[in-house]
Amino acid sequence: MRYIYIVLSATKTMPARLVRRFTGFKYSHTSVSMRADLLGMCSFSRTNIGNPFVGGFVLESPRTLTLGKNNTSVPVKIFKVPVSETGFAAAESFINSVRFDRDGYMYNIITFITAPFGRTGYIYKSFICTTFALELLKNAGALPDIPLQTGRPITPKDINSLLAPYAVFEGEISEYTPAEGKEIPIDEYFVRRGIYSETKRTARYVHRLIKRRIFTRGQ
């Protein structure tokens, strides 16, 4: 038997605060870890700290959740989901297929923006943090039948309800110490660029996302 760890967190970014306000739920972000120590988590979110509009597959760690501030922490809820050896291998394969996909999976900022209003916008080869986590668990055979209403965004509150039997920890991430591990360097996440550079990046990214939505309908 192997385990996949799903982490709900209440990060301290402005978009995360807005999500919590609109949903009325304590947590706003979902991450996946194949390790108990949560080093080398992955998710779909912004790819660097200075721009919430450009995102994709990201590697995370407790340090990224705290925005690199050593003297702070964030509330988390952790679920330990049992899967078979075959399911665990399938989940790892899914992560690699998404991470190294030739077209590049994108962060669906459109769904992120419209989710508080109960709307979703499917885009080929794109995820938000919650849909990535659910798709990974489906590939692992952990959730063969997901009892969720279709046609609306999947929220961290949905994840919390689905995985309630597997909850193993709730508290500050700084208090979660199941095993010693070496922090994985994720330097790119903390790169800050100028406003002009980030504006250009955002415009190119949104243009690419809209093109994918228009020209890949039905895929």
Image: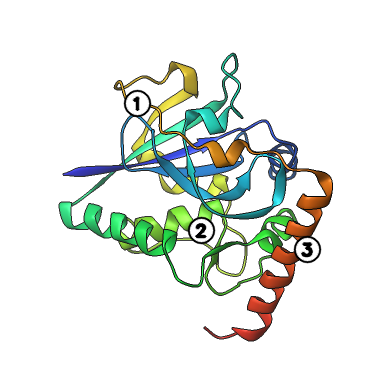
In the image, is 105 to the left or to the right of 215?
Answer: left
In the image, is 129 to the left or to the right of 143?
Answer: right
Residue 203: image quadrant is: bottom right
Q: Residue at x 16, y 52 (%)?
A: 85
| Mark pair 1, 3: CA separation | 37 Å
Observer able to see residue 57: yes
Write down the residue under mark 2. Answer: 131
Element marked by disc 3: helix
Element marked by disc 1: loop
Badge 2 local density, few (<14 within 10 Å), some, or many (20+)? some
Write down the residue under mark 1. Answer: 182
Residue 66 x, y percent position in the rendering: 58, 27
Element marked by disc 2: helix
- Tell which of 105 and 219 is nearer to you: 105
Residue 35 x, y percent position in the rendering: 31, 37
Query: Which mark sits nearer the N-terminus, 1 or 2?
Result: 2
Query: Which mark sits nearer the N-terminus, 1 or 3?
Result: 1
In the image, is 2 to the left or to the right of 54?
Answer: left
Q: Are marks 1 and 2 in contact (CB under 8 Å)?
A: no
| Mark pair 1, 2: CA separation | 28 Å
Classify the position of the N terminus by image quarter. top left
Write down the residue under mark 3. Answer: 203
| Mark pair 2, 3: CA separation | 24 Å
